[in-house]
Amino acid sequence: MFRLADHEALDENTLGRFISRHAAESVFRYRPLLNAYMTDYAIFHEAPKPPWKPDNRIAVNFAKYIVDTMNGFFIGIPIKITCDDKAVAGYVEFLDQYNDQDDNNAELSKICSIYGKGYEMYYVDQEGKIGITYLTPMDAFMIYDDSVLERPLYFVRLYIDTDNVLHGSVSDEEKVRYFVQKGKIVWEEEKAHGFSGVPATEYRENAERMGIFEPVLTMIDAYNKAISEKANDVDYFADAYLKILGTLLEEDEIKHIRDDRIINFDGDTEKLIVEFLQKPNGDETQENLINRLEKLIFQISMVANISDENFGTSSGIALKYKLQAMSNLAKTKERKFTSGMNRRYKLIFSNPVSGMKEDDWVKLKFKFTPNFPANILEESQIAGNLSGITSQKTQLKVLSVVDSVDEEIQQIEREEESTRDPVMQQMFGGVVDEQSGVLETAGSRTTEA
């Protein structure tokens, strides 16, 4: 965490020191994490072996699998935002649609899983509307004060142009200042941003800001090395040396044996030895190591291996037990994400462009839905059993096929209204008693209209 005392100004020298520290952190920490996600592992950068030795380089991208699996489980079903205030709900829906926020949330969640944290920045675009975008820790950093509250003081965004010149911006609670680094930092223009606070939010994967596969990265490297050596052994046995003892072959004879794959000797062959030269077979040891590493990678990362053949045979509560560790991770991430979203809408509503009251953000409620495999039949049975015990809203929450409980209740009410329509009554072949409100059908059976 980059921190600055309240009484200390962020001048050119101080900003330059922060940029240097950020560059070092990007190279030594964030770049290896991104490389792992992009299948660029240490096995590809080891010194080459001699030409006469097999030199396979195989990488199994557990990092990408872990990140994408967790991301699909955590935010594969988009976050639902509800609000009893229709004006606020309408603006939030427009804001999210305008900024493709479902996609932004998914990308921000993935960035947090890779790096341990990610950033979201807010601005007023050329159309006069509020824009939201995400940034990786390699592209930006936040500077906090030195108090126990860790209040954001500055948000620094960086980019390099085609001439390899560093550009950036520094946002504080009132304005945005732009700069360029040409040997030294040169300030350019500045402008007010209109938000009541630093217009950016840091989202965290966890309190330690640790990427989801970061604890198992050494295991992934060991797995890649083990499976590459396994492939090398396969090549070695396919190209094993032929050992012939007891006679000396001419070069033409050796070529004949190699090309025609025929060995034919006459005379006394009792002392003649013809066999392949083999090194000790470590297949069982290699397999045990590979299996142990694979099991540990998923166990320590706490992400389920849903591709395992035994995983698909589980159902109901047994399946949820297998996903319990990943569900616990998702709950921790959910709390961190909720904190970030609270700051998002607090800042956005503070800008006059939004047209909202500053405190309207407290009316928003966020619902995260873990992407469990759905059993519709089981859900419908549970919902049916809740009839008469809970409210209709609670019943509908059980059903994963219902995207919006409030909209579903409104649709049910509209359908009930339609049964009171005279045309509908005529279709059902009955009339409604005006005093009792009961539909009397030709079969003398009564139902509520």
Image (cartoon, helix red, strand yellow):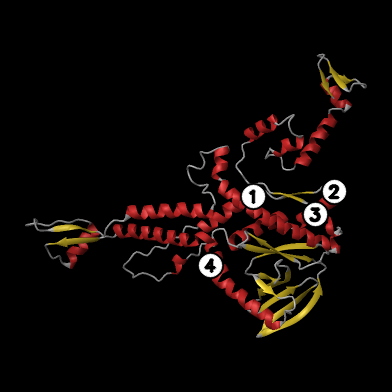
Q: How far apart are marks 2 and 1 (CA)?
A: 26 Å
Question: Mark 1 highlights which residue?
Answer: 76
Type of residue at label 4? Pro
Question: Mark 3 highlights which residue?
Answer: 362
**Residue 382: % across, % down:** 66, 32
For marks 2 and 1, the one nearer the N-term is 1
Question: Mark 2 highlights which residue?
Answer: 86
Type of residue at label 1? Gly
Total labels: the figure holds 4
| Mark drawn on residue 32 | 4
Question: 426 left or right of 115?
Answer: right
Q: Distance between the residues labelled 3 and 4?
A: 39 Å
Q: Distance between the residues labelled 1 and 4?
A: 26 Å
Q: Distance between the residues labelled 2 and 3?
A: 14 Å
Q: Distance between the residues labelled 3 and 1?
A: 25 Å
Q: Quadrant of residue 187?
A: bottom right
What residue is shown at x 86% (from left), y 21% (from top)?
Answer: 438
Residues marked 1 and 4 touching at CB (< 8 Å): no
